Amino acid sequence: MLTSGETRYARSGTVDIAYQSLGSGTRDIVVGIGWVSHLELLWELPETVHFLERLSALGRLIIYDARGTGMSDRPTEAPSVDDLVPDLLAVLDTTGSQRAVIVGWLDKAAVALALAARHPDRVEALVLGEAMASTRPREGHPAGLEPAAVERLAESVEQGAWGTGYLLPWIAPGVSQEPRVLAWWRRWERMSATPNAAAAMLRLLLDVDVRGVLDQVQAPVLVLHRRDNDFVPATAVRWLAEHLPDARYAEVPGDELAAFFGDTDALMDEVEEFVAGTRTGADEDRVVATLLVTDVVGSTSQAATLGDRRWRELLDWHHQEVRRLLARHGGVEIDTAGDGFLATFDLPSRAITCAVAISEHLHHHGIEIRAGLHTGEVVRAGGAVRGVAVHVAARVAALGGAGDVLVSGTVQALVLGSGKALHPHGTHVLAGVPGTWEVFRAETGPNFA
């Protein structure tokens, strides 16, 4: 069972930020809980510990109390997003984290977005819960928090409700009558902030507006919403996902606002799949497979030259021939998107043979493709496959030009001794995938007949 780490401090200007660093792994997971928090109280409730355990399975876990709350310094003024970004950067620097997955709920989601826009080299991916680009309705933004509802909560906090558990039905209705949770929540409120500070931070939620930085966020983003949570409207959360360059929106069951209450496993299954490509909390079929991704080079210009009807006929022929060659070499078609294919193979050597055969055959008929291959663990769900391995194959393919069949270093290692001639194609950083990757180019000719 995961246990509390030692609380330490990062210096951000003149402000001390409390943090804990736990475990190890190939990636760093940095968590901003949202609104108010207290690092050491997180370890006193089984629900919160379970949430942290699921996150820690994905890599080194770094959790922190934001400026103004918990064990961090509490300046007089409630902190803005602009105040909180340098604090998060200070935590990254102090813990030696060069590049991390940033997890943020509500206002801490806005902080994560701002960090990713200003310091893209420090962010591997974002996991955002109940996140909005603008926390209130504004011109061009359809929905948000109800200012009157937020003000009522702030007034209640100021007028004696803070520390009584009054806010728990708003945060997590399903557990609000459980004595052990209610007792913990009362302490959580009292130890995370004073009533004045809590009310000020509630009101400051309504000032959050990061619409101007969305197009600068290069990292892949998972945007999560609990479908029965009425306080944060789904319309606003979806708007954010739709206006980010690389985002996926996912709804999970529940009405809780806090990530660590309710069906945490349903939530974390989505996070785990996004970050690691697996769902260890689910019963889906996990297998090792070789993934082949292809797409036609210069398809846009070809379509413009040929016209819609002739291009559609050529694309139908392309699909027919790719399917014929997949069947011949033992490939299983998983998906097609426009002019591209995703297929799986049991053996990487067969996948290479098939990819080269497809490339050469189409070349002789005036169509140039590029192909990428990678072998890794995937999750089978119905007829689909999911996981980081799929993304690696797609990123490898994107490195190629006309006629290129490129493979990851994993594939190259697996086919040693098979007679497949593979030539170095450089070391690359694959967008959204940790680390650097050796890539190789398959040679055409008799060895691949």
Image (spheres, rainbow, N blue to C red):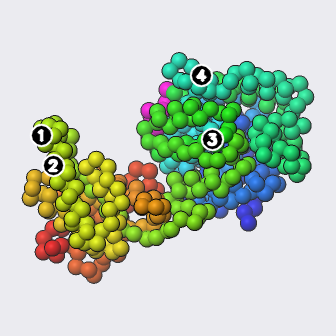
292 or 187, nearer to the observer: 292
Q: First in sequence: mark 1 or mark 2?
A: 1
Q: What residue is pinned by disc 2?
A: 314
Q: What residue is pinned by disc 1?
A: 306
144 or 196, nearer to the observer: 144
Dividing the picture into quarters, in which one does residue 163 lie?
Answer: top right
Callout 3: few (<14), some (14-19), or many (20+) C-alpha neighbours within 10 Å? some
SS at badge 4 = loop
Q: Position of residue 380 (x, y in %)?
A: 46, 64
Q: Residue furthest bottom?
A: 417
Callout 4: few (<14), some (14-19), or many (20+) C-alpha neighbours within 10 Å? some
Position of 303 compared to 180: left or right? Answer: left
Q: Mark 2 and mark 4 in contact (Cβ < 8 Å)? A: no
Q: Position of residue 281 (x, y in %)?
A: 61, 62
Residue 85 can be seen, yes or no: no
Above or below, 1 against 179 in this view is below
For the residues marked 1 and 2, what is the alpha-carbon distance in whole angstroms?
9 Å
Q: Nearer the viewer, mark 4 or mark 2?
A: 2
Q: First in sequence: mark 4 or mark 1?
A: 4
For the residues marked 3 and 1, what is the alpha-carbon distance in whole angstroms?
46 Å
Q: What residue is pinned by disc 3?
A: 227
Q: Mark 1 belongs to which amino acid?
A: Leu
Dividing the picture into quarters, in which one does residue 47 lie?
Answer: bottom right
Q: Mark 4 belongs to which amino acid?
A: Pro
Q: Position of residue 442 (x, y in %)?
A: 22, 66
